[in-house]
Amino acid sequence: GLHHLIGGPFPSWLVSASIVASIMMFIPVITVAINHHMTMRGHFGALTWSPTLRFTVFGAMIYTVVSLQGSTMAIPQLNAMFHFTDYTIGHAHLGVYGFFSMMMFGAMYYIAPRLVGWEWPSANLIRWHFWLTAIGILVMFVSLSTGGILQGLALHDPTVNFMKTLEIVWPWRMVRSISGTAMLLGHVIFAVHFVMLLLKVGERRETAPYFSNPSSPKQDPVAV
């Protein structure tokens, strides 16, 4: 919304209306979060064995977090403090990757075998992909948010020069680089695994490569 442009070349009434609308987003976001939770109620145990569900539930949880965070960023006092800092960058990364990308990974793990007519060759590769990317984006978000808060406080302190603010965020950006490396490794694993799927490597499976034996599996063989 236009609340990201507080202080920008827009009429004050337009920015104020956007702030109000952003704060009111708490209502639909919480409604969607309740819908997500109630959909999974009684089925959370499936997260221990379902690769697709693990990615999509993670993405749904991140959707709630990043949406509520976005509404709080519309509060003028907080926006003025942290807008032009790494805090906003962390918010953007969490939304695009933690929500959208993880949901798309989950969708691909479900759809691709049905298009190719072959199941994913390795549950272990999916497991590595999930943990490297999930931990990577969470560490990246925490590091950028922490560094951004310290950066914003320093930028609003007249006794701190600009070069000092760069020194403050440097170690947090190093952590971001490490977390980004973990995510990159997860992407490489996914790319290799996807090529293996296309080439139909390994023995033919009749069911998806579950992380463990589900207590009440729904046998859903790929239609060929």
Image: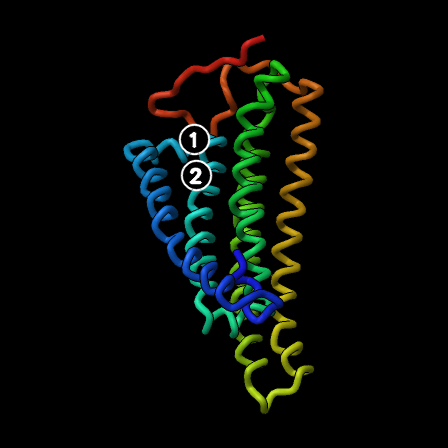
Q: Which of the two residues, 164 or 66, is positioned nearer the viewer here?
A: 66
- Residue at image mark 2: 57
Q: Is residue 129 above or below residue 116?
A: below
Q: In the rendered structure, which amino acid carries the disc numbered 2?
A: Val
The number of numbered discs placed on residues in the rendered structure image is: 2
Instruction: Using the numbered discs, state the Cα–Cα distance from disc 1 to disc 2 in whole angstroms.
Output: 13 Å
Q: In the rendered structure, which amino acid carries the disc numbered 1?
A: Trp
Give the percent coordinates (x, y) of residue 39: 33, 33
- Residue at image mark 1: 49
- Residue situated furthest top in the rendering: 224
Q: Is residue 141 above or below residue 170?
A: above
Q: Which residue is at 54% across, 75% downward?
A: 150
Query: Does label 1 or label 2 sit earlier along the sequence?
Result: 1
Q: Which of the two residues, 113 or 1, is positioned nearer the viewer here?
A: 1
Q: Is residue 170 above or below residue 132?
A: below
Q: Is residue 116 above or below residue 156?
A: above
Query: Could you tell me which secondary element the residue under label 1 belongs to?
Result: loop
Q: Which residue is at 56% across, 23% downward?
A: 111
Q: Which of the two residues, 196 or 88, is positioned nearer the viewer here?
A: 88
Locate residue 122: give its quadrant.
top right
Quarter containing the C terminus:
top right
Query: Could you tell me which secondary element the residue under label 2 belongs to?
Result: helix
Q: Which of the two residues, 31 or 63, is positioned nearer the viewer here?
A: 31
Q: Which residue is at 65% across, 23% downward?
A: 197
Locate residue 174: give its quadrant.
bottom right
Q: Does residue 29 appear left or right of residue 18 in this picture?
A: left
Give the percent coordinates (x, y) of residue 55: 49, 37
Q: Nearer the viewer, mark 1 or mark 2?
A: 2
Residue 37 got which mark?
A: none
Q: Which residue is at 53% across, 70% downward?
A: 82
Q: Residues within 10 Å of mark 2 (few under 14, many from 20)?
A: many
Give the percent coordinates (x, y) of residue 196: 68, 25
